[in-house]
Image: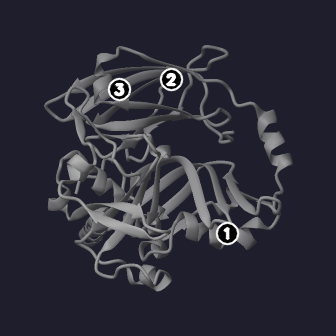
Amino acid sequence: MRIVLFIASLFFVSVTVNAQQGTFMITGKVLNADTKQPMVSASVFAENTTIGTATDAEGNFKLALPNGGYELVVTFTGFTTETKRINTSDATNTMLLFELKQKEKELQAVAIVASNEVKNGLEIYGQFFTDQFIGKTTNSKSCSIKNKEVLKFYFSKKRNRLKVMAAEPLIIENNALGYTIKYALDSFTHEYASQVSLYTGNPLFEEMTAADAAQEATWKKARQEAYKGSILHFMRSVYNKQLKEEGFEVQYLADMGGRDTALKLKNFYTALNYQKNDSLQTVEIKPNQNRLGVIYSKEKPAAAYLAENELEPVDFEFSILGFLAGHSITIEQNGYFFEQNDLSISEYWTWERMADQVPYDYAP
């Protein structure tokens, strides 16, 4: 059940391409589904990017996006959020249509009544949520949520589960990387039995204005460091067949009597069953093993990570990708991949959370 204050209407999008500049333009219109009237000042943005706009008095909008794939998100207070996957190939479509409806308030009321809200939840769980959501890296020390008061905490004793929701988008200031992030938190859950945290939402990045050239240079360097070895860096390297050149190695992980054994691969792309669709400009991978070990050799793990994970390798960053049996993922040229819910991530990549994220339109 999605309980976020966001859009709902009728939404038209047309797409054209500017191949010379490596961008494509989307234009659209947002209407209320019930009244068919234009939605003025509805927020329209490409998720996990710095690219967004608002609709005009006629409900129209226009966005230019770097070639690749995105989740297009439309939001408006009092309405449910709708997203649509788009990419460069959508230039062949003259119109995309969304039926968007007003949020049913009774659904939110039922969800809240059925949960056990902790009245002083921010005091009890606030720091835990911040550690799990923002992270505990060096960058996280310069990252803060400016409107924590919108957070609501629910704890189920029966399920031993913490659930966190927000009445409006979280405003996150990342002074380490120079971004303000507007994060529409769908939900955050932490299962205490498995110690697994899951969160979903729609982030929009905005670049901060640097005070001087020195701060601009600091942010530029910090963003590059955050990008290096990240899953975004990895997916772009897979797409461009540049894994080895960019410092990545892929291994199969096999379960040998309850213990993982790494199997080195002669050809990464054969092992991934790499297939490129030139017409759609996408790459599909479907490894023969469901679990992949990913080594990034150009950086060593953070000292704080090693302090919490004493058995992890110290000379390189090691992460694990888990694929659903028989399923593939598709990668766009900007590193966006889908279906994201079909891929599990563990080890080092889970250490770097919102405080270490750069947007999909980031160019190192």
- Name which of mark 2 and mark 1 comes first in the sequence: 2
Camera-side residue of 149 and 267: 267
**Disc 1: CA contacts within 10 A as few (<14), some (14-19) or many (>=20):** some
Residue drawn at 65 percent across, 24 percent down: 101
Q: How many marks?
A: 3
Proximity of marks 2 and 1: CB atoms separated by less than 8 Å = no
Residue drawn at 62 percent across, 60 percent down: 147
Disc 1 element: helix
Residue drawn at 46 percent across, 71 percent down: 259
Image location (x, y in percent) of residue 267: 18, 54
**Disc 3: CA contacts within 10 A as few (<14), some (14-19) or many (>=20):** many
The residue lying furthest to the right in this view is 113
Q: Name the kind of residue labelled 1 in the image.
A: Gly
Q: Quadrant of residue 245?
A: bottom left
Disc 3 element: strand
246 with respect to 149 (left or right): left
Query: Which residue was labeled with disc 1?
Result: 126
**Alpha carbons under labels 2 and 3: distance apart:** 18 Å
Image location (x, y in percent) of residue 113: 86, 47
Query: Which residue was labeled with disc 2?
Result: 57
Query: Which residue was labeled with disc 3?
Result: 26
Question: Relative to 49, is 255 above or below?
Answer: below
120 with respect to 140 (left or right): right
> What is the basis of the colouring in this image?
one colour
Residue drawn at 28 percent across, 48 percent down: 272
**Disc 2: CA contacts within 10 A as few (<14), some (14-19) or many (>=20):** few
Q: Quadrant of residue 79?
A: top right
**Alpha carbons under labels 2 and 1: distance apart:** 40 Å
Comparing labels 1 and 3, the label whose residue is closer to the camera: 1
Does residue 228 appear in this view?
A: no
Image location (x, y in percent) of residue 323: 43, 49
